[in-house]
Amino acid sequence: MKFYKPNFWKKKYYNIYSLILLPISIVIQFLFFIQKRIITPKKFNIPVICVGNIYIGGTGKTPLTLELYNILKSMNKNPAIVKKFYKNHYDEIELIKQNVGNLFLNSSRKKAMDEVQNKNFDVAILDDGYQDCSIKKDLKILCFNEKQLIGNGHTIPSGPLREKLSSIKKSQIVVINGNENKNFENKLKKIFKDINIFYSRYISEIPKEFNNKKFLAFAGIGNPENFFDTLREYGLNVTKSKIFPDHYSYKKNEIENLLDLANKNKLDLITTEKDHYRLKKLGFNINYLKIKVQIEKKDKFEKLIKSYI
């Protein structure tokens, strides 16, 4: 399924499109409210940490999940990552498998958690699942990206939010990827004064051979513009860029066309690590930028995590 985020999701106030879609948003939120009331979450015998979001896609959940996995390993824990199985999420699945392993997939997160609990793991990390009512979470971490935050502030389809911002009351930690934003911090604190707010940023080691090249960058992720900005922040010369939908299933001829376009303009292709795994299935080995998350005030973050496990 192709899905591009509409531009009106980015605007701060209501416009004609969000107003037209508002009744549907109200119905969806009402159904979600009913769902939360009728489903009893299952409590597991091991701590469950959920890394989720309310803004649809591109908030850095998976990189933070990987960093959290490494943090727990450094605490001599034996963590497992749980992810709901979606056929078109092959990229995220391979990214986790290649970096850490110990990944449990199922169309039901609860069934995946049953498997984790029955094996020799002492903590589970849910990559996504903030809105999953079937599992009792011991710690909830909510992710935002500083460049998008909450978009127009409305819920789908009127806006990009899965839930209203007030849902942060369910979480204990917010991680904002990007620069400090005191106005947003204050907005969160007004809703939930005890929320713990941390910042993170993407870090990468740029291969030397990238330095003197000009690139055609492309990406099929939640917020591809953020990826292009990251490339430029690291000093890479991005001359052209191409956006595809999140978790896009590339066709061989599309990549061949991109290669032709790059050759005609004397450019090199570059993409994300997630896209790299999708392209590898098609037999293409395209340059990609490998990133990981660096958490500011990491000692404080780790101490807080430890208190919940």
Image (cartoon, helix red, strand yellow):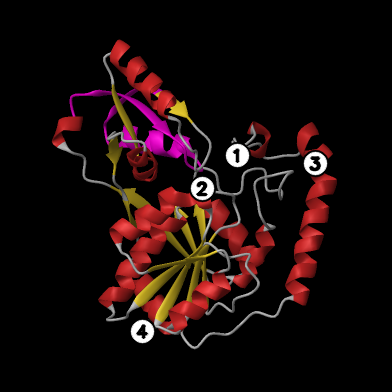
Residue 120 numbered mark, or none: 4
Quarter in which the N terminus is drawn? top right
Q: Nearer the viewer, mark 3 or mark 2?
A: 2
Secondary element under disc 2, as helix, strand or loop, is helix
Q: Position of residue 93 (x, y in %)?
A: 41, 56
- Res. 98 in view: yes
Closest to the camera, between mark 4 and mark 3, is 4
Residue wearing tag 2:
88
Q: Which residues are magenta?
A: 211-240
What is the CA distance from the residue labelled 3 to the residue labelled 1? 21 Å
**Callout 2 amino acid:** Asn
Residue, x 55% and y 69% (percent of image)? 109
Badge number at residue 1: 1
Q: Earlier in the sequence, mark 1 or mark 2?
A: 1
Disc ID at residue 126 = none
Earlier in the chain: of badge 1 and badge 4, it is: 1
At mark 1, the secondary structure is loop
Secondary structure, mark 3, is helix
Which x, y percent locates residue 30?
A: 81, 61
Separation of marks 3 and 2 at Cα, in angstroms: 27 Å
